[in-house]
Image: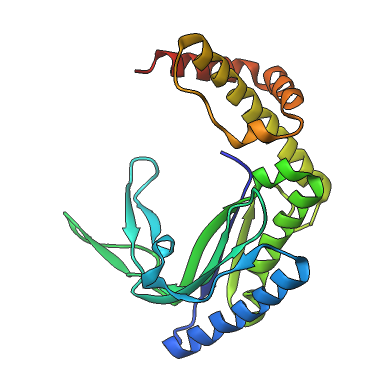
Amino acid sequence: MGLTIHYTQWLRRTVSPERALERVQSAHRQAAQMVKRRKLRGITPILPAADEPWAVQHKCIGTWPRGDVIQLVPSAGWVFTVDVGRGCEPAMFGLCRYPASVRKTKGLVPTGCGSGWRLQKFSKTQYASLHGPAHFLKCHRAVIDLALIWERLGCEVTIDDEGDYWPTRDRAALFRHCDFLNAAIAGAAGALKDLAEEKGGPPVRAPIFAHPRFERLEAEGAIRHGEKIAAFTRVVAGSP
């Protein structure tokens, strides 16, 4: 749970592996320049997709949640990862080929991933807010701008920003969403911590406890989401 940016880079055209690698190399150079210019934490070398477990994609075949979730292992491709900043999930980028179909009990089932080169990933930026609003904005913007590099390289890019910062770059909306989710998470985490202490269960650990305004957020969460948090803790209390 937490505010996340989902993004896909997709090269629809059928190009040779050599041309696909050229785009990945160009994107890596531009990303490395951004890392240096914006003082992000770092960037990995380009790796073959076969050497990076996180390049595996998960696809729901059928209607969620009744469909089958399958793993799609890339048959070719290259990826790299940017360590954006403290509290922000690293962001992976690249281009891979995935199987056009998978064999199920009833025969071959199309995956919808068989055309061109692509990579669909996400980065949770929520907990960058533990280190201040300026740091959170820096990380959130960086993930967006790293994804947009691929547009300049002729790829189709889709971005689903749960913070509503993109495409209008609305900072107020981003901070509003972040505060709302921080309060919800703090309220739920605080309630679980109290429940664990009351029942003698294992200690509850969560990144939100490190937020400098945790107690205020916890109180806001209890006011805004009290009924849902109470229902949630009742379910947890009744579980084995």
The answer to whether residue 1 is above or below residue 190 is below
Quadrant (top left/top right/bottom left/bottom right) for the C terminus: top left
Q: Residue 154 at what x, y percent from top left?
A: 61, 81
Quarter where residue 76 is shown:
bottom left
Q: Position of residue 207 (x, y in %)?
A: 61, 37
Looking at the image, can residue 166 be seen?
Answer: no
Dividing the picture into quadrants, the one containing residue 31 is bottom right
At 62% from the left edge and 30% from the top edge, which residue is drawn? 185
Q: Is residue 230 above or below residue 181?
A: above
Does 93 sit above or below residue 121? below
Q: Residue at x 65, y 21 (%)?
A: 225
Q: Position of residue 131 (x, y in %)?
A: 74, 44
Q: Quadrant of the N terminus?
A: top right
Q: How is the image coloured?
A: rainbow
The answer to whether 38 is drawn above or below residue 197 in the figure is below
Residue 135 on image: x %, y %: 77, 51
Q: Nearer the viewer, residue 145 or 160?
A: 145
Can residue 18 be seen from the camera position used here? yes
Front residue of this view, candidates 132 and 221: 132
Apparent side of residue 3 relative to residue 8 in the rendered image (left or right): right
Q: How many marks?
A: 0
